[in-house]
Image: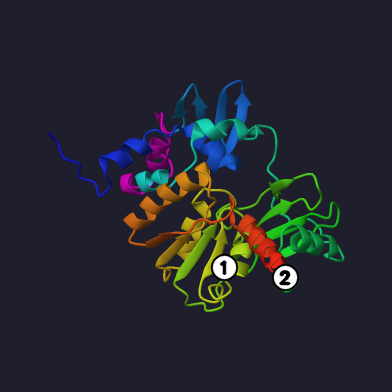
């Protein structure tokens, strides 16, 4: 009986082979997916690659396959082990989330370049929302605004959370509505590999705390003020490990990852899969979900309410 010669387990290989290419692209590279007609798709980078009926075929190269694993190896150039590890880091159940995916881009529709929404002349609406509805201290919100990590959009007065590349150029932004009707979306053209992040005050800090949203990251920092100086904070904008992988590649001195994803089914499953992938790469990984509520913003609001009950409202 042939033994597994790879430094990944048979269980990881089996798990990686479960991912079909269409759903993988819908969930993790939606900007790469182009709808041709009916159930047929191609990719923006390779318009001769046809994805249909659970299979894919790259006509110009004469290669094809069924799974996302095949695609990462044959098209993206991943090694077998790297491809397995990447797919094992993917966390959402396709059956639970596929119905939430927006339709793919039409083949005749051009992708717009990334551009931040115009900024309003003041940030009063955003300050009111983040302080009074989200429970964040005003001095923290003002500090993030001064660092151009948050601002108020001019047209709809939404909160805009900005992700910068290592040179300080904005490459990603996500919008959160400030009024009663919930609204959240990424700015078109955003690079999901960047994400919203708050670097540690000490650039040599070797720890990163990872969250699903920017507000959760900020809330955690408020609850754990002593940590903010010695840890980087990163929002994944969901549960895909793409932004984390990119951040770690640009900060090779980071050795410890603290997973602070939501305390729900999706967050727990995501944490387990990302943890396995990171530990296989020799990272020290801690799991620190919120103790009160689904996420760290709910925990912050519960903490603030308890302080008020004790007569210590901020």
Seen in the picture, residue 156 relative to 226 is either above or below; the reply is above
Question: Marks 1/2: CA distance?
Answer: 43 Å
The reply to whether residue 99 is visible in this rendering is: yes
Q: Residue 195 at what x, y percent from top left?
A: 59, 57
Instruction: Please tell me which of labels 1 and 2 falls first in the chain.
Output: 1
- Quarter in which the C terminus is drawn: bottom right
| Residue 155: percent from left, percent from top | 86, 53
Q: Give the labeled residue for mark 2.
A: 311
Label 1 packing within 10 angstroms: few (<14), some (14-19), many (20+):
few
Of helix, strand and loop, which one carries label 2? loop
Of the pair 27 and 221, the residue shown nearer to us:
221
- The disc placed on residue 166 is 1
Residue range (magenta): 61-82
Secondary structure at badge 1 equals: loop
What residue is shown at x 59% (from left), y 64% (from top)?
A: 220
Name which quarter of the figure residue 181 lies in.
top right
Does any portion of residue 48 appear in the rendered image? no
């Amino acid at each position: 009986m042939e033994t597994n010669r790879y430094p990944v387990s048979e269980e990881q290989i089996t798990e990686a082979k479960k991912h079909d290419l269409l759903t993988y692209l819908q969930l993790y590279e939606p900007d790469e997916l182009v709808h041709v007609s009916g159930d047929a798709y191609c990719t923006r980078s390779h318009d001769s690659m046809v994805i249909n009926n659970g299979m894919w075929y790259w006509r110009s190269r004469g290669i094809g396959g069924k799974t996302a694993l095949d695609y990462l190896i044959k098209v993206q150039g991943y090694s077998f082990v790297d491809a397995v590890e990447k797919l094992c880091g993917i966390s959402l159940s396709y059956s639970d989330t596929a119905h939430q995916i927006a339709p793919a881009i039409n083949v005749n529709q051009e992708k717009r370049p990334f551009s931040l929404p115009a900024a309003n002349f003041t940030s009063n609406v955003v300050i009111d929302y983040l302080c009074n509805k989200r429970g964040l201290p005003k001095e923290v919100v003002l500090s993030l605004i001064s660092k151009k990590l948050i601002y108020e959009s001019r047209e709809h007065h939404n909160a805009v959370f900005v992700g910068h590349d290592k040179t300080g150029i904005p490459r990603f932004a996500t919008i959160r509505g400030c009024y009663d009707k919930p609204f959240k979306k990424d700015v078109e053209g955003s690079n999901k590999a960047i994400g919203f992040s708050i670097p540690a005050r000490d650039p040599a800090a070797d720890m990163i705390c990872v969250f699903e949203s920017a507000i959760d990251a900020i809330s955690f920092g408020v609850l754990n003020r002593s940590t903010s100086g010695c840890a980087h904070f990163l929002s994944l904008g969901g549960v895909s490990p793409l932004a984390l992988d990119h951040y770690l590649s640009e900060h090779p001195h980071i050795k410890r990852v603290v997973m602070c994803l939501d305390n729900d089914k999706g967050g727990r499953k995501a944490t387990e899969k990302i943890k396995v992938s990171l530990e296989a790469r020799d990272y020290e990984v801690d799991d620190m979900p919120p103790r009160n509520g689904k996420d760290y913003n709910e925990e912050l609001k519960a903490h603030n309410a308890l302080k008020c009950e004790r007569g210590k409202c901020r």
